[in-house]
Image (cartoon, rainbow, N blue to C red):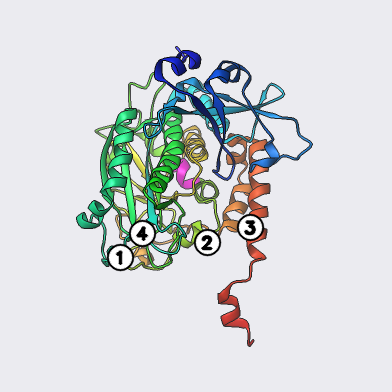
Amino acid sequence: MATDLVKAAKSKGIRYFLISFVDLFGTMRAKLVPASAIGDMAKEGAGFAGFAAWLDMSPADPDMFAIPDPDSLIQLPWKPEVAWLAADLYMEGQPVAQAPRGTLKRVVAQAAESGYRLKTGVECEYFLILPDGSDISDPGDRQAKPCYDQSALMRRYDVISEICDVMQTLGWGPYQNDHEDANGQFEMNWDYADALVTADRMAFFKYMVKAIAEKHGLRATFMPKPFAHLTGNGCHAHVSLWDKAGKKNLFLDNKGDLGISKLGYHFLGGLMAHAPALTAIANPTVNSYKRLNAPVTSSGATWSPNTVTYGGNNRTHMVRIPDAGRFEVRLADGAANPYLLPAGLLAAGLDGITKKTDPGKRLDLNMYVDGDKAGKVRRLPLNLLDALREFDASKTMKAALGEEFSAGFLKLKNAEWTDYTRHLTDWERQNTLDC
């Protein structure tokens, strides 16, 4: 039964609702609605001008309405009089094809028609930095290898523990928090769930981390590569495909190589086949490509992939098989759209299952050191433009995610690239002023 938002407001003491959606660039948009109006908003939706967000629309387009999903209700533990709701976008009574959450729901529905159900977990890395963004927030966090540094972790205990307490209150099942590989960088893990549930939680997690950091006088960033010499922010996705009822893991086969079934390897084959196009979704900003294919960082490794390869429990590949029955896709970064990332992974994997795609040979190599021994393997795109061209060339991915979505995404992202190329950098002046 869907949550009755009017009753929820009265029983939980909610005064305001944030009716929220995520646009094509991953920016969270919302309207603050008083509880007295939530009954009508639940039916009709909150009105938005689509052109005012990152969607391929114009001021001439009619109003867009965000209809909240009652089952996504999250009461803010740090401000319990406010509740957050993920919403689906409609225009003139029809779903907005460009909407990221709607795109994921369409691909999930396609999978359900074949009897499949995607479950995902995400590892969202972030930095705690100074409010002006100039440096990390902890001047004492300067170890060359800071990963798992207990002292640096505990100096940010107040922030980390509050975020973890919130996740426990919400029933997400958080199970570990750590200082990551870069100075000032942290990661928090919680239980996997159905893809849409995880996507909603990831969207809210990014908002929550930023809000709680601000409360403590700090700033949180999920930017892929905020500091050139430090490891970037990844967003590793753990994926498994289940039967429609969600009871049986279809990737799990104890007799299969590394505990993965034939169907699982076909899904992996789809990920490998469509990896260049998928990169545009998983790594959607100019800055993303400062993390991919990056030089060695101060810790000794970037922890990000540079080739379209997979291995066993080996973190130097694009896809890792950490244990039986699941894959860890290490491609995505902190800028990845919470809804488009699982939609892209599922679309690629389903195509692999349909075509029985062979993922190729597993490589038991350290790709950071012995990549030259891997033979002919594809490299990941070197910049956003290359990734967008790969996506544009993929009829399969564009069809699976929707032609209207794909056209809007490509239009806006190509415009972003063009805007970036107009920017004159210090490097250009330093290296070509006297040419």
Q: Residue furthest bottom?
A: 434
Residue nearest the viewer, comparing 85 with 280 = 85
Q: Earlier in the sequence, mark 2 or mark 1?
A: 1
Q: Pointer 1: residues within 10 angstroms few (<14), some, or many (20+)?
A: some
Labelled disc at residue 299: 1
Q: What element does badge 4 sit on?
A: loop
Q: CA distance from mark 4 to mark 2?
A: 31 Å
Residues in magenta, as a range: 269-273
For label 1, the SS is loop
Tell me which amino acid carries mark 2.
Leu
In percent of width and height, residue 402 lies at 62, 35
Dominant secondary-structure state across the stretch colored magenta: helix
164 horizontally vs 224: left or right: left
Q: Quadrant of residue 148?
A: bottom left
Which residue is at a point 36% across and 59% down the rendered structure image? 137
Question: For residue 137, which numbered disc appears in the image?
Answer: 4
Q: CA distance from mark 1 to mark 3?
A: 30 Å
The amino acid type of the residue labelled 4 equals Ser
Dots 4 and 2: beta carbons under 8 Å?
no
Q: Residues within 10 Å of mark 4 (few under 14, many from 20)?
A: many
As measured in the structure, the alpha-carbon distance from the residue carrying label 1 to the one carrying label 4 is: 18 Å
Q: Which mark is residue 417?
A: 3
